[in-house]
Image (cartoon, rainbow, N blue to C red):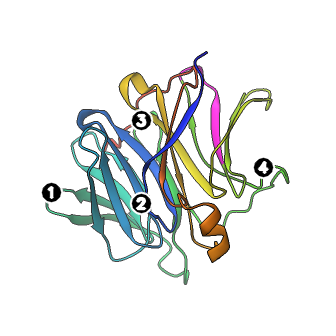
Amino acid sequence: MSSIKIECVLPENCRCGESPVWEEVSNSLLFVDIPAKKLCRWDSLTKQVQRVTMDAPVSSVALRQSGGYVATIGTKFCALNWEEQSAVVLATVDNDKKNNRFNDGKVDPAGRYFAANRRSVYKLEKEEQIPDGMCIDAEGKLWVACYNGGRVIRLDPVTGKRLQTVKVPVDKTTSCCFGGKNYSEMYVTCARDGMDPEGLLRQPEAGGIFKITGLGVKGTAPYSYAG
């Protein structure tokens, strides 16, 4: 196995970066900054980043089979036209629940867009702090970003055994995905909200986008929304 390399490829200073998705056709990484209400697209070839600001917190983004993207914005499923920087509401949920919003979302193999709200409760392992966003590699193993844990771990979803731990130089790792050539790179989002000035001095790259290479395993292309 080649040696693992970790680098901050985009010092974005996200308040809470989340939902990284690789778009192969444009060699770009999509991600969101939830409290900043932003959707972002980073071109890995030009190193340029485009940002679109919405009217509510944006918690996830996904590719769409018919073109463009879909996203969860506040409590709405929306279709996005990136060129026009516009959004069309596809569905709205939980209108009667005050201060609620979607927290994350993924497309399944059948092309359905699933999203979870903020009212779910999980049992946590103390050492790993809070398991957050995750992805699956080409061998069917699970990679989980550990919020407040400063790491991404690889798990066997059948046995629950931890197979690998990759430490990242920021504490608030939030999510991960595979991308790049042949999906041989991993991209990790993180947050900086809640950090005090001393913490930000210790971790100046908090809120950035990290790339990990040399993992010795590849990912697969993300599923696209079929609607």
Of labels 2 and 4, earlier in sequence is 2
Q: Which residue is mark 4?
A: 128
Q: Which residue is mark 1?
A: 83
Residue 201 falls in image quadrant: bottom right
Q: Residues within 10 Å of mark 2 (few under 14, many from 20)?
A: some
Task: Residue 43: give its label.
Answer: none
- Badge 4 element: loop
Q: Nearer the viewer, mark 2 or mark 3?
A: 2
Q: Earlier in the sequence, mark 2 or mark 3?
A: 2
Mark 4: which amino acid?
Glu
Q: At 51% across and 82% down in the image, what residue appears?
A: 96
- The kind of residue on which mark 3 rests is Pro
Q: Type of residue at label 1?
A: Glu
Tell me the quarter of the picture where residue 66 sits. Answer: top left
70 lies left or right of 128: left
Question: Which residue range is magenta in the image?
Answer: 138-145
Q: Could you say whether the residue bearing mark 2 is in a helix, strand or loop?
A: loop
Task: Locate residue 81: give its quadrant.
Answer: bottom left
- Residue 12 is marked as 2
Task: Mark 2 or mark 1: name the one nearer the start of the chain.
Answer: 2
Front-most of residues 73 and 210: 210
Asked whether the residues under the numbered discs 1 and 4 touch, taking CB atoms below 8 Å apart as contact, a structural biologist would say no
Residue 117 picture location, percent across and down: 57, 65
